[in-house]
Image (cartoon, grey):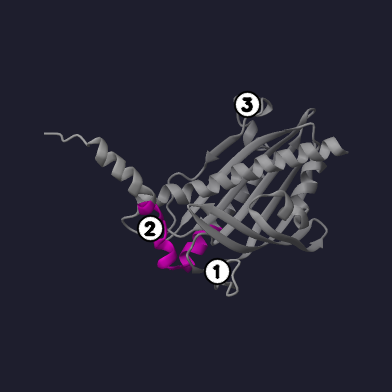
Amino acid sequence: MRIKSSGRLKSIMRSLFPIMLVSVCSFPAIHGSTLQEHTAAAFSEYASMVEKELDQRAAGSMPFLHATDSSEDKDRLVQGKTIIENLNKKNKTPDGIIHDWIGCIFVPGANLNDVIDILIDYDSHKTVFDEVVDSKLVEVSGNHLKSYLRFKKKEVITVVTDTWYEAEFKYYPGKKAQMISRSTRINEVENFGKANERLKPEGEDNGFLWRMNTYWSLEETGDGVIVDCRSVSLSRDIPPGLGLMIKPIITKTPRNSLEKTLHTLRDAAVKKKKTQ
């Protein structure tokens, strides 16, 4: 015999859901997590696989851009669509989750240097990208750069991280370029904005973000620039019994951040072109 939920019961559940959600999402903040050596090693191995694919694309054994793997995707981009895809749906990382998302977008009217100038102008990232609350270029040596970024991300709860990166970019024939940015240190910020603000020890925090590599591939066409951005990051695993409620939140954060970054980059490049 099936019992139908009354309208009153549904109303009560809807009113309680936000409270339940916040409580559940606060669980990782109450019970910290420590980055294990085998988890970090798994991320390094995964990143090496991604970078090997990038080398193959640069060498011509694969299409240079993920966006041009299919002509249909390329047409969608030129029409103004954004392509976002999860490349690691079956996560098998021990004691962690590797998030691997790729986003593709078309920047109309721009040239290669228009887009690259925005990407490497780290001093301006805090005024361009919404999730960046502080940023600076630390060091430049040829095509190698070191930078600092403070991210503030909010998905029900707010997480602030201080991140340091090393990046390198390469130009290829045919008006193409790649930029690889690897995190070298990430500290979660505790009590953000308060007098007792402090950085938690690296790898000994709530595990929202332990590693983050970003792989940019750009190709100039006659009408603009096609941009691939592959974001590969590492976070803690889902606590047992809380997967159904926490996993959607944790997994959508990297996707949302990637989509925001691409749209902001496109808008900034188009605006830059108009003012030239």
Look at label 3 and name its amino acid. Arg
Stretch of the chain drawn in magenta: 19-44
Judging depth in this view, the residue of 252 and 75 nearest the camera is 252
- Residue 28: x and y, percent? 42, 62
- Identified at 16% across, 36% down, the residue is 3
Q: Is residue 21 left or right of residue 206?
A: left
Callout 1 crowding tier (Cα within 10 Å): few <14, some 14–19, many ≥20:
few
Q: Left of 228 or right of it: where is 173?
A: right
Q: Earlier in the sequence, mark 3 or mark 1?
A: 3
Closer to the chain start, of discs 2 and 3, is: 2
Q: In which quarter of the image is residue 143?
A: bottom right
Indicate which label's residue lies in the foreground, 2 or 3: 2
11 displayed left or right of 215: left
Say if residue 103 shows up in the picture. Answer: yes
Q: Which of marks 2 and 1 is nearer the N terminus?
A: 2
Circle 2 sits on which residue? Answer: 23
Our reading of the magenta stretch's main secondary structure is: helix
Q: Which of 115 and 152 is in front in this view?
A: 152
Q: Is residue 203 above or below residue 222?
A: below
- Whether 123 is drawn above or below 100: the answer is below
The residue that mark 3 highlights is 76
The type of residue carrying mark 1 is: Asn
Q: Which amino acid is tagged 2?
A: Ser
* Residue at left offset 65%, top offset 24%: 75
